[in-house]
Image (cartoon, helix red, strand yellow):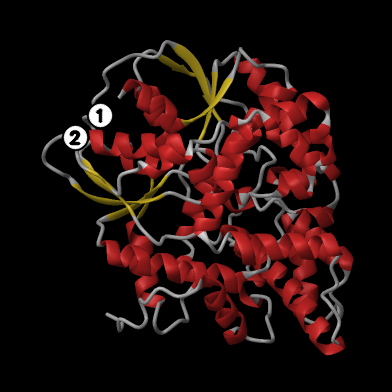
Amino acid sequence: MNTSMETKQIDPFLSIEREKKSASHAVTFDLDELMNCMRCGFCLPSCPTYRETGKEMFSPRGRIALMKGMATGNTSLLSDEFAQNMYMCLGCRACETACPAGVHYGRLVEGARDVIEAHKRKEAAASDQPLTLTRKERIIRDIVYKKLFLYPKRIDRMGKGLWWMQALGLQTFADRTGLMHILPKPLANMQKAVPKVASPRRRKARQPLVTSKRGVSRGRVGFFTGCVMDVLFFETNEKTARVLSKVGYDVVFVKEQACCGALHAHSGESYGAIALAKQNIEAFERANVDFIVNNAGGCGASLREYAHWLQDDPNYGERAKAFVAKVRDISEFLAPIDDLPFQGTLDATVTFQDSCHLRHGQGIYRQPRALLERIPGITLVELPHADSCCGSAGIYNITNFDRSMRILDDKMIEVKATKASYIVTANPGCLVQMRQGVVRAGLQGQVEAVHIIDLLDRVL
C-alpha cells in the first residue's frame, strides 16, 4: 500500500496540471494497434458517419488509414481536415464489435485526438500565441475540462442553479417567450428534454450508507454516482441504491469520488482523465468496498479503462487493475441474482435502446434485456438497430447537432414502429437524447423514455 501522502486529498486542478507536465511532449499514435487493422471493411456498415456520408474517409477503416499516414510520416502536418474528421466520429465503438481482428478503435481515435490537442499546445508554445482554437472553443474547453468537471462540488452547484431556475419557472418562461432561443440551437432544443432536478434539500438528505433490507448483507457496494447522472437523474441514483439494498447489499455513497474521466479522454485531454482516475482509485480504496457499481454505460466503460490508462504507472498500475476487477454495471450486477423480490406487475410493452459504451465498450447487452423480461407483465419488443448509436455520443449532440438529430429522427421512426409505451436505456446521455427524440417525434403521452432502474424500482 502506498504512503498516506499518496492518498492525501489534493486540488484537482493541481493534479491535472501535474499530469500534463509529466506527460510526454511527443504524444504519438499507437502504431502496433493501427497495424492490427486488416482493412476487411466489416466495420463499414456499423459506422454511423459512413452510413450517412458513404465516404471511406469517414469510416473507421478510413480514419485508421489517415492515422497510419500521420504515424508513419507520410502526412507531415496535422491539418484542420484531419482534426475535423477525428472529431466527427461519434466514438460509439460499434466497429469494435464488428471487427474480426479485435482492433481497439476507441483507444485509437482517443489517441488521435490526444495527438491533435498536443500538437496545438506545441504550436502555441513555439509561437507564444494562444492555441489555434476559436475564442468560443477556448472558453468552452476551459470551463468543461478545468473549471467544472474536475470539481464535484461545482457540478453540485450547477445542479442547484438548475433547480432554482426550474422552481422559479424561469425555464418555462424563457421557453414560452422565445428567450430560450438566445442559447445555441443545440442547448435550446435539449432543455425541453432535461428532467426536473432534485431539490437541494432532497440532495442534502442523502444518507452516506444505505443498509441491506434483508437483514444480512451480501456484501458492501461502492456506488459510482457519476457527475451528470447525479445532477440530472439524482432520483434514478437513489432508486439504484434502493434496489441494491432490497436485494441484500449495503450501499456506500463514496465521498471524494470524481468524474469518471470520459469527457477528458474523448476530447484529447488524456492527462485530465488520468488525474481523475487516480482520484477515484484513491477514494474507493479508502471506502473498502467489495464491488464498484455504476448505472451509466459511458461511465462504466471509462472506469474499465483505468488499467489501460495507468498501465505504465509504477504507483497506480496494479491499483488500477484491482479497481477495474471490482467494476460492475448495475444490470450486469443484478442479472445473476435469482431471487429478485418482485412485488408488483407492469403491464406494458417496452423496447430497449443500447448504450453504445455499455454494449460495444463493455460487451453488456443480454443482461438488461434479461432483467426487463423478468419484470412481471412486461412484453419486450426488440428495437431494430438497437445497437446503433442514438446520436448522443457524449457531447456530440452539441458539437454536431444537425447530424445528431438526423440519427435520432431515424431512431425514433423505429421506436414508433414497436408501439412500445416505454423506451428504456442505461446511460444519462442516451436518456436525455431519447427524451428529446420523443418530443421531436410528437410522441409525448404515448412513449416515455426511462432508465432501466426506473422500471425495476417500480416493481421491486
169 and 348: which is toward the camera: 169
- Compared with 182, 139 (above or below) is below
The amino acid pointed to by label 2 is: Lys
Q: Residues within 10 Å of mark 1 (few under 14, many from 20)?
A: some
Res 385 seen here: no
Q: Residue at x 76, y 58 (%)?
A: 87
What kind of element bears circle 1?
loop
User: Dot 2 corresponds to which residue?
Assistant: 213
Which picture quadrant has residue 13? Answer: bottom right
Picture coordinates of residue 415, whole percent (x, y): 64, 22
Which quarter of the figure is the N terminus placed in?
bottom left
Which of marks 1 and 2 precedes in the sequence?
2
- Can residue 349 be seen here? yes
Residue depicted at x 85% and y 44%: 53
Q: Secondary structure at mark 2?
A: loop
Q: Can you give x and y, in whole percent of width and height, for residue 224 in the image?
A: 40, 52
- Residue 340's label in the rendered image is 1
Residue 371's label in the rendered image is: none
Which is nearer the eye, 216 or 158?
158
In the image, what residue type sits under mark 1? Leu
User: In this view of the protein, which residue sits in the foreground, 343 or 336?
Assistant: 343
